Image (cartoon, grey):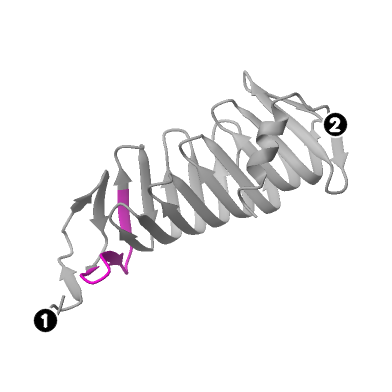
């Protein structure tokens, strides 16, 4: 790569396509010819046509077929909304790590956590650290949600409220199983067999 300028500046209105993404920058678009990393310092919008994802960020950098990193993120899929302070999306593994996440879908409203991992190929989201949700009303340490099966497992201490009913769990061994059916939530501390599968996912986010 000798003799090449390491940064290539592209025009404001340029839209590029790599892999299954279309790229719409809000400002300059820089391509580092040595590393293959493209930076959008003023942010932009990435649309993943293959996986039905739309990402908007105030700062974005990506490498073709490898990763996307972004700050002040809004990530939309067909049914989910992810708002986060930061995101790192591993393209080959179809995984995204978030910090400061607020998540919403038909079952959860404003589900917040300090960190989270989304496994897009498996329709699973793992949330850890000060987990809070407005609907259903929940406080927890860790939550694993299977978005396709519409079920979730809470691990560790929790407080769950539904109407006048309250369920509490204390300590690392506490568990709460949630199932969403017909717009209603079924909550139980008696775990069905499939809860073991959900619990195994929690180890994916240390």
Give the quadrant of the C terminus. Answer: bottom right
Closer mark to the observer between disc 2 and disc 1: 1
Checking the image for residue 164, the label placed there is 2
Asked whether 39 falls inside the magenta stretch, the response is yes
**Residue 103's quadrant in the figure?**
top right
Badge 1: residue crowd in 10 Å (few <14, some 14–19, many ≥20): few
- Residue furthest to the top in view is 182
| Local SS, label 2 | loop
Asked whether the residues under the numbered discs 2 and 1 touch, taking CB atoms below 8 Å apart as contact, a structural biologist would say: no
Horizontal arrangement in the rendering, residue 154 relative to residue 110 (left or right): right
Q: Earlier in the sequence, mark 2 or mark 1?
A: 1
Q: Visible in this render: residue 134? A: no
The answer to which of 174 and 73 lies nearer the viewer is 174
Extreme residue toward the front, this view: 2
Segment tinted magenta in the rendering: 31-46
In which image quadrant can residue 6 be found?
bottom left
Count of marks placed on residues: 2
Q: Is residue 107 above or below residue 92?
A: above
Q: Residue at x 47, y 47 (%)?
A: 95
When the figure is inspected, residue 155 is found, relative to residue 27, above or below; the finding is above
Q: Which residue is mark 1?
A: 3
Q: Look at 86% across and 42% down and name the residue there.
A: 169
């Amino acid at each position: 790569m000798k003799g090449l300028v390491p940064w290539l500046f592209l025009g404001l209105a340029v839209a590029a396509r790599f892999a299954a993404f279309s790229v719409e920058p809000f400002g300059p678009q820089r391509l580092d010819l040595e590393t293959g990393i493209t930076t959008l310092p003023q942010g932009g919008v990435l649309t993943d046509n293959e996986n039905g994802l739309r990402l908007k960020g105030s700062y974005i950098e990506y490498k073709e077929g490898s990763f996307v990193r972004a700050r002040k993120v809004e990530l939309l899929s067909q049914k989910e909304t992810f708002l986060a302070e930061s995101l790192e999306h591993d393209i080959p593994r179809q995984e995204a790590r978030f910090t400061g996440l607020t998540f919403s879908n038909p079952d959860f409203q404003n589900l917040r956590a300090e960190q989270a991992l989304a496994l897009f190929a498996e329709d699973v989201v793992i949330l850890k650290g000060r987990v809070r949700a407005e609907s259903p009303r929940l406080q927890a340490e860790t939550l694993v949600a299977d978005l396709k099966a519409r079920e979730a497992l809470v691990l560790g201490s929790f407080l769950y409220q539904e109407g006048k009913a309250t369920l509490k769990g204390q300590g690392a061994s506490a568990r709460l199983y949630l199932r969403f059916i017909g717009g209603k939530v079924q909550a139980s501390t008696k775990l069905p067999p499939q809860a073991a599968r959900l619990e195994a996912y929690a180890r994916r986010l240390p």
